[in-house]
């Protein structure tokens, strides 16, 4: 385990990070206030002078005064998130939010629940975000504060990325593994169909343990390897982070981001504005990116990556899950299966009455185009796996689709 994230005793290097998150958090809250989003003056005023226990004090506390006790596979015990005073609990909450993606979902849910139990004043602080961690777990949170580390617990902090190293040996490893760790060793072997299936199931079950960008990297590697191995797995949970098909709503998603930032009166040629330059530059970027939304000549992965960078620069990522879809789900179409044919020979397609119908054709349909034969639910089902669902439709419905497409 990365010791930077351990909060335990007086010689713990992670304690400096714990003590440092308070000013970082307050700075972020002030910026949110200036943007008119969800910052809180009460947090800033109450916590900027919070008194935090010293490392030697933490070392003397019993295990019950920590929100999370991790029993590692090698037998070591790590105590995290002190909660014996309200100030320490508040700081631990902020620290958990800043580092939650380094923990598996079950572990962070345990910590979140214990912190909520310990924090008496629910009217201030990021308690709503802490509750979200508990809710996202979607299972009953275990009693107590102990988490037993599992064999498949991998942390984002140990991941270097999926891009292969220039060295030939690392290229081989990168081709057959999802990630390379910091020592250049492969993590998650997907070199065979059997291995791919195993790792894909792991991702489907545990992808929320990874921060958003690593989910995308993981899914993209699975997608590309599936095409290489000529397998077409059932993979809706993978495709929403990386597929070969554009989301039918991608233009609307970019437009919604422009609407969020429209209060900035931008002079596009100079990007001059007296306020926050990041938002101004991002707004110009969104407007340019909108021209490429759903453009078949545009590399879909480059588009998704660009949208993600703009979201981070502009602060739009703060609205993820609060009315704004994350950049990857906004770009990629969630489909029922990943098809290698889409990668190698253009789009997956079928024919009816001698007319060719592609995935993009079906994704472009609107309910009003279908003369009342399809309700929104049926159309959503069709778009979830366009070709396979189309093939199962009764002939009158297929004819209605053909007419709507003008073929």
Image (spheres, grey):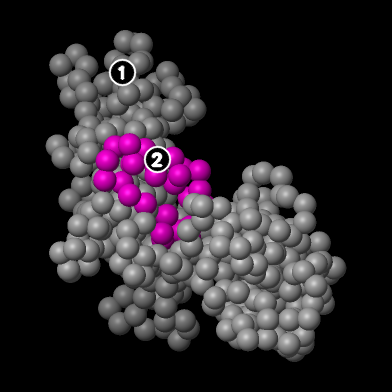
Alpha carbon separation for disc pair 2 and 1: 29 Å
Residue 369 bears which disc, if any? none
Spot the residue most to the top.
395
Q: Residue at the spot x=59%, y=57% of the render? A: 149
Q: Position of residue 168 (x, y in %)?
A: 15, 64
Q: Which residues are magenta?
A: 188-217
Look at the picture and state if 6 lies above or below 340. Answer: below
Which residue in the structure is indicated by mark 1?
391
Q: Residue at the spot x=50%, y=43% of the render? A: 205
For the image, the number of numbered tags is 2
Mark 2–mark 1 contact, CB under 8 Å?
no
Look at the picture and state if 275 lies above or below 231. Answer: below
Q: Residue at the spot x=74%, y=60% of the render? A: 145
Q: Position of residue 42 (x, y in %)?
A: 75, 78
Look at the picture and state if 381 lies above or below 206. Answer: above
What kind of element bears circle 1?
helix
Q: Position of residue 404 (x, y in %)?
A: 30, 25
The quadrant where residue 167 appears: bottom left
Look at the picture and state if 203 lies above or below 87. Answer: above
What crowding class fits label 1: few (fewer than 14 Cα within 10 Å), some (14-19), or many (20 or more)? some
Q: Is residue 134 left or right of residue 208?
A: right
Which residue in the structure is indicated by mark 2?
198
Toward the viewer: 103 or 290? Answer: 103
- Characterize the magenta stretch by its predominant secondary structure: helix
Q: Is residue 124 visible?
A: no
**Is residue 183 on the magenta stretch?**
no
Toward the viewer: 227 or 182? Answer: 182
The quadrant where residue 231 appears: top left
Look at discs 2 and 1 and give the one toward the viewer: 2
């Amino acid at each position: 385990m990365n010791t930077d994230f351990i909060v335990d005793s007086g010689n713990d290097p992670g304690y400096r990070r714990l003590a440092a998150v308070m000013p970082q958090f307050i700075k972020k809250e002030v910026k949110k206030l200036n943007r008119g989003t969800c910052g809180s003056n009460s947090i800033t005023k109450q916590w900027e002078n919070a008194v935090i226990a010293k490392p030697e004090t933490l070392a003397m506390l019993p295990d019950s005064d920590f929100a999370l006790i991790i029993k590692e596979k090698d037998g070591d015990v790590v105590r995290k998130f002190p909660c014996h005073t309200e100030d320490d609990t508040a700081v631990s909450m902020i620290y958990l939010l800043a580092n939650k993606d380094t923990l598996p979902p079950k572990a962070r849910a345990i910590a979140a629940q214990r912190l909520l139990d310990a924090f008496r004043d629910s009217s201030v602080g990021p308690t709503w975000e802490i509750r979200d961690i508990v809710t996202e777990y979607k299972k009953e949170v275990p009693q107590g504060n102990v988490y037993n580390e599992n064999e498949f617990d991998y942390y984002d902090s140990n991941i270097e990325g999926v891009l292969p190293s220039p060295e030939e040996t690392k290229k081989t490893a990168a081709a057959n593994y999802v990630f390379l760790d910091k020592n250049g060793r492969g993590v998650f072997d997907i070199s065979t169909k059997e291995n791919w299936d195993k790792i894909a199931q792991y991702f489907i079950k545990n992808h929320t343990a990874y921060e958003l960008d690593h989910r995308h990297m993981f899914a993209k590697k699975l997608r590309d390897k599936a095409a290489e191995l000529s397998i077409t797995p059932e993979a809706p949970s993978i495709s929403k982070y990386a597929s070969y098909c554009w989301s039918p709503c991608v233009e609307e998603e970019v437009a919604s981001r422009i609407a969020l930032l429209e209060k900035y009166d931008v002079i596009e040629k100079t990007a001059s504005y007296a306020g926050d330059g990041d938002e101004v530059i991002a707004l110009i970027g969104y407007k340019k990116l909108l021209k490429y939304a759903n453009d078949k000549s545009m590399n879909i992965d480059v588009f998704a990556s660009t949208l993600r960078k703009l979201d981070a620069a502009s602060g739009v990522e703060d609205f993820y899950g609060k009315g704004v879809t994350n950049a990857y789900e906004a770009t990629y179409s969630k489909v029922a299966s990943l098809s290698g044919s889409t990668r190698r020979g253009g789009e997956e397609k079928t024919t009816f009455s001698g007319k060719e119908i592609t995935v993009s054709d079906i994704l472009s349909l609107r309910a009003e185009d279908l003369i009342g034969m399809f309700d929104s639910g049926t159309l959503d089902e069709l778009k979830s796996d366009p070709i396979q669902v189309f093939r199962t439709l009764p002939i009158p419905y297929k004819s209605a689709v053909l007419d709507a497409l003008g073929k």
